[in-house]
Structures are given as structure tokens and as C-alpha cells.
Amino acid sequence: MLRDTLGKAEKAKEKKALYGEDIDLEKFIKEEAGEHEQVTKANEVPKKVQDTLLKVGVDPNESERSGTFIQVDQTGVCSTCGSESVEIMGMNVALEKYNWLKDYMWKSVAPDTDKYTAQTALREANEGPSGYFIRSLPGSKEVFPLQACMFIGDEKVMQTAHNVIIAEENSELHIITGCATGEDVSSALHVGVSEFYLKKGAKITFTMVHNWAEQVDVRPRTGIMVGDDSTYISNYILTSPVRSIQSYPTAYCTGTNSKVLFQSILGGQKDSVLDMGSRVLLEGEGSKAEMISRAVSKDQSQIYSRGHLAGRTQNVKGHLECHGLVLSDDSMIYAVPELEGSSTELEMSHEAAVGKIAEEEVLYLTSRGLTEEEAASMIVRGFLSMDITGLPPELASETKRMLDASLQGM
Amino acid sequence: MAVEVSGKKVLKDIDLYIDEGETHVLLGPNGSGKSTLFMTILGFPKYKVTNGEILFKGENITDLNTTERVKKGVGVSFQNPPAIRGVRLMDLLKVESGQKPDDEELSPEMLELAYKMKLDENFLDRDVNLGFSGGEVKRSEILQLLAQKPDFIMFDEPDSGVDIENVELLAEEINILLDKDKKPGLRKNSGLLITHLGYILNFVNADTAHVLMDGRIACSGNPSEIIEDIRKEGFKGCVQCCGIH
Ligand SMILES: Nc1ncnc2c1ncn2[C@@H]1O[C@H](COP(=O)(O)OP(=O)(O)O)[C@@H](O)[C@H]1O
Ligand SMILES: [Mg+2]
């Protein structure tokens, strides 16, 4: 690792994040890599893990998947690839294979962003790399998605991962990632640093389902470099309870005509605190961004739905949309849409609406024989089941199934 | 029965009896309280019965909520139902026809009925009432009733906003819902048809008509005679000479 990175990380060890409750890192165990057994196929991981994987869209039988990576706690336990167009492997393996890979590390997420990135960088230096490396080869188009899973198997673990995803020129890459915890884990911390690089004409779709345990804290840190004529689409689904999650991925649209779409579906349950944002900096001529979120708060949950759209050059366009339904008096949705324009020729807009379930809609459904509870749940599921756009047909129907499954619990 | 809405006395003295197998028509000018009576019988919470009671199949249902009334066999077609984002017409039809919600497909019988209502599979996939045309709203309402098979059905202005050609199509299904294909003595299902223009009555035979004025049933009698009167004399004139009927 570059000395500079390490120095920055060292200095930021205690640096609090801008948003989200400050987590005491000392409370968690830094388990070493190698604690969990390696397997050669995804369906060889323990049965208990497999059942959980399915819930977050990761298929242990790898049907219609081009490859798989599974990290349990700090150990990459499985990486398989059945396609010539894409690569997927642990960062430890990738760094040995590709000398140039280090040039992509800590370039879209700064190691001194906060204590969580710092911790990830320090562990990487002291204990060795974790996380995955994914790359699509130039001009390739693999229709079947790669799947990656971050799994926490042991109590009180602090899982860190540093992922690098590269889509080479004119390639198309589809990724499904699921994050989950084992049944007997009650509290843990997950920090995942993900860096995306889209070269000219590339497209990445990144569909992520989170299913953490109720006492888990989650602090993902994501940076996306979007090159000329390239498209990045992120779909995020979280509907199960979690102690806290705070994330604010930033896409740098520096390429001309680059495009970004963030779609997120948030269901707050129990005492969950979800602080979810997305930021797009439109710095390339003709670049476009759209951020769409649907949030529903139940029980005592708190949802912060942030969005920041910055137009910094001419002919850029952006739209930010956040719709929220507050289902209980003890829950809260706080929508913070921010627009920043610093160029003359730009078009940016936002739309935010937070409210309760329309009584008229509930009554309509009761007049069809549904009880009030059934009616409310049908309306909530309908509200959250937004059409996720931008996916190829096979993946779209798979994602719809994943979403439907996630909404069962709402 | 007397009914208050948001503190306002809308229905003052309603006395209405619909026998098994009978279809009644409720006529009356705008604002006379037709929809209020509909919502009250359906049991929507805003409509407070301040006097009297509602009996269904001999049972007092005044204190039952809408769901309970519907489960006992009450069905409705709304004039202006709300759109619900993300809830597809198909999802509703599954529940209404007693299919499991996670069934991937609609049953062949339901698909056939939908086809009859000129609503194809793409249409069934749309969010209910969202961007539906006036005619589509009414056809979707009737299709849902065909799925539910209620014993007593109220229709609030089923012909408003519908072109002439489709009124006939709707009337045909309304007739089926109300057992009009059976001999009068064998009809089981009953209906209350609300209309202020009465165009649909060219295609649906009713047994009795009532005229609602200022929250009272001002006149009851033979449907074609009453409609004839209203056409000639207007609602006021009709009510004035009501004694004849
Ligand atoms: N929610 C309400 N609040 C107050 N007044 C109402 C409400 N709904 C209906 N009304 C009043 O009750 C009367 C009857 O309305 P309605 O039943 O809709 O008549 P119709 O269906 O015959 O046109 C009208 O004067 C209307 O303004
Ligand atoms: Mg009306």
C-alpha cells in the first residue's frame, strides 16, 4: 500500500463520519482472514449460509450467474467464474495477479473520509486485503450477472472489505450483491468500501439487497468514476430491521454524456435507523443523473433520505425524487434533497413528498373485502414495488422476484 | 334512517326495502344524497347513521365495518374510485376471486371474463385506476364484481363517462350480476342502481325506481313511468305529481 494512503488513514483513525451515529470500533472483534473454510463451489458453503444467501438474491447453485464471490467475516471463502468475459476474485488474489490494480485503490473513496475508511485501509495494510475484485473485459457483454455476498457469520465481528469493480471500454457488467448475517449473530459491524470505474462506453448495473440482523451497524463507503458515454445504475433494497446503516455513495460523472441512475427502496422496521443518500457530481458535458427513492417507516424506525445533485458544467440534467410513507407516529422520514447549480445551461429538479397512507385507498380496498391491515399492507407493498428500470429482461424479472420477496416482510 | 356526513345532515328520512332478486333504481338531482346513501350502506366510517338501522338478509349490519359487510355479500361499483400506485388490477382480481396472492397467473375463468370486458392482459398489469379512461374505470369495477360474486350490488353512476357502445357492454354484465338472465322468481341477487340520467335503464330492467330529493325518497314507483315523468317535467315536476304512481 502507498505510504501516503497509510499516513492519511492513520490520521483519520478517530475521524467521525459526517452522518450517522458514531460507532465505537473497539467494541468489535477483528477476526483474521482464514478463519473460515475455503470451498470451490458456492453450494459447498454451510447449508445455513446458503439459505440466507438466497434471501439476498445470491443463488448458491449459481444458475444464470456468471460467477460468485463470497466473503464470510474477513475470509474470502469462495470465488468461481464461468465466463470468459468477466473476472471475479478476492482482492488478495487480484493484487498478486495485476500489478496495476493498486493504482485503482483509494482513488474514488479517500482513505481519510472517516474512521471507517481509515480502519479498512489500516486493516488492509496490516492484515492483508479483503473484499472482491470484479472486471469486465473490453467490448464484452456478459448477460448473466456476477454475484457477490458479504456474510457475517460470527458474533461481534467487524467485517471490512475493499472492493474494486472495473468495467473496461464498451463492456457491460451486471452485478448482484447481497449482504446478510448468520442466524445466531445479533451484533456486528460491516464496513464495505467499494470503488467503481467505468471506462468509455461501459455500463454497470449494481443491484444490492441487504438483510442484516437487528443489532448490526453498517457503514458502506462507495465512489463511482463514470467515464465518457458510460452508464452506472444502482438498485438498492433494504426492508429488514438493522440497528443502523449510513451510506452516501458518490458518483463522479466526469465523462461526457455519462449517466447515473440510483434507485432505492427502503423499509424501516423496529428501531432501525437508515441514513441513506446518493450524490452525483455532474462534471462532464451532457451528463445526466436520476435518483429515485421510496421509503416507508414503521414502528420506531427513522429514515433519512438524502440526495445531492451538483451540476457543474453545461448541458447537464438531473432529477431527484423521494417519496415517503410514514406508517406509525413513532417513526420518522426526513427527506433532504439538495440541488446545486454552478453553470448556466443546466436543468435540475427535485420532487419530495412525505405523507401517510391515503385513507381513500384503504377504504377502496376494504370495499373489496380486504381488512384495513391487509389493505394497508397491499398499498405499502405497491408503493415500494417501483419499476426498477435499466436492467436487461432476465435480470429485471429476477430483481422483481427479489423485491417481491423483500416486501413480504413489510 | 338519517345520516350525517362531517356534521352535516345529508339523509333525513330514508325508508328503503329491496327484496331478494330485485333491482331498484335510485334517481335524483346532483347533490340529493345518492352517493351518501351508497357509502352509508357500504359502511364507510365518515357516514354516521344517526337514526334507524341497516338490515342485510334480515341481520342488523349498522355496526359492522365495510370489510365485514362485503364479506357478507355486499358488492359495489364506484363512480370515481381512487388510483393506487403499484397495486395492479391483476393483484386485486386475485384477491377478489379467492386466488392466492402469490399465484403467478390469473385463473383462466378470470382471464376470460376480462377479455369479455375488453380488458386484455397488458391492461390487467396496470396500476388500478391509474390513468384509466372513464370507460375503463367502469369496466374494471364491473370485472372486479364478476370476480367477487356478491349477493347485493350497488352501482354508483355506472354509465357516467362511458361511451354509448360500452354502456351496452356494461349493462350486459350488470344484468348477469343481477341474475336478469334468470326468470324473476328464480333471481337471488339484488341491486341498487344509482343514475341521474337513466341512460343505462335502456338496457337494464329495474323492478322499482326511487327519486331522492333533499335527503328524502320523494317518490317511488314503476321505473319507466318515473323516468318518463322526469324527462318531461324535471325532477321537481316528477316529485310533485308523484301521488299518481
Ligand atoms: N364529505 C362530505 N362533507 C360534507 N358534505 C358532504 C360530503 N359528502 C357529501 N356531502 C354533501 O351531501 C350532499 C349529497 O351529496 P352526494 O351524496 O354526493 O349527492 P349525489 O350523489 O346525489 O350527487 C351534498 O350537498 C354534498 O355537498
Ligand atoms: Mg353521486
Image (cartoon, coloured by chain):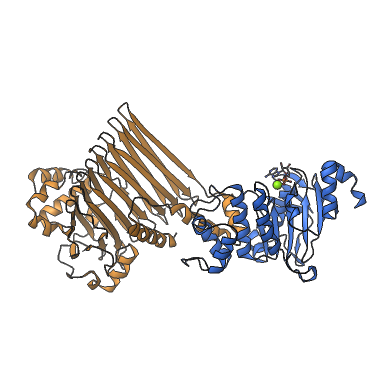
Q: Which of A311 and A201 is in front in this view?
A: A201
Residue A19 seen: no
- Which residue is farthest front? B165
Residue A175 placement (x, y as % from top left): 26, 56
Q: From this view, report whether residue A68 is shown above or below residue A198.
A: below
Q: Is residue B237 left or right of residue A344?
A: right
Q: Is residue A293 left or right of residue B224?
A: left
Q: From this view, report whether residue B39 is shown above or below residue A228.
A: below
- The quadrant of the image that shows the N terminus of chain B is bottom right
Residue ID at (42%, 57%): A270
Residue ID at (29%, 60%): A178
Residue ID at (43%, 39%): A351
Q: Nearer the viewer, residue A178 or A158?
A: A178
Q: From this view, report whether residue A62 is shown above or below residue A246.
A: below
Which image quadrant for residue B170? bottom right
Residue B111 placement (x, y as % from top left): 54, 64
**Ligand 1: which quarter?**
top right
Which image quadrant for residue A161? bottom left
Q: Nearer the viewer, residue B170 or A352?
A: B170
Residue A366 placement (x, y as % from top left): 60, 58
Residue ID at (44%, 51%): A296
Residue A166 seen: yes
- Which residue is farthest right? B244
Residue A57 placement (x, y as % from top left): 32, 62
**Chain given the colour blue:** B
Q: From this view, report whether residue A204 is shown above or below residue A288.
A: below
Q: Chain A is drawn in which colour?
A: orange
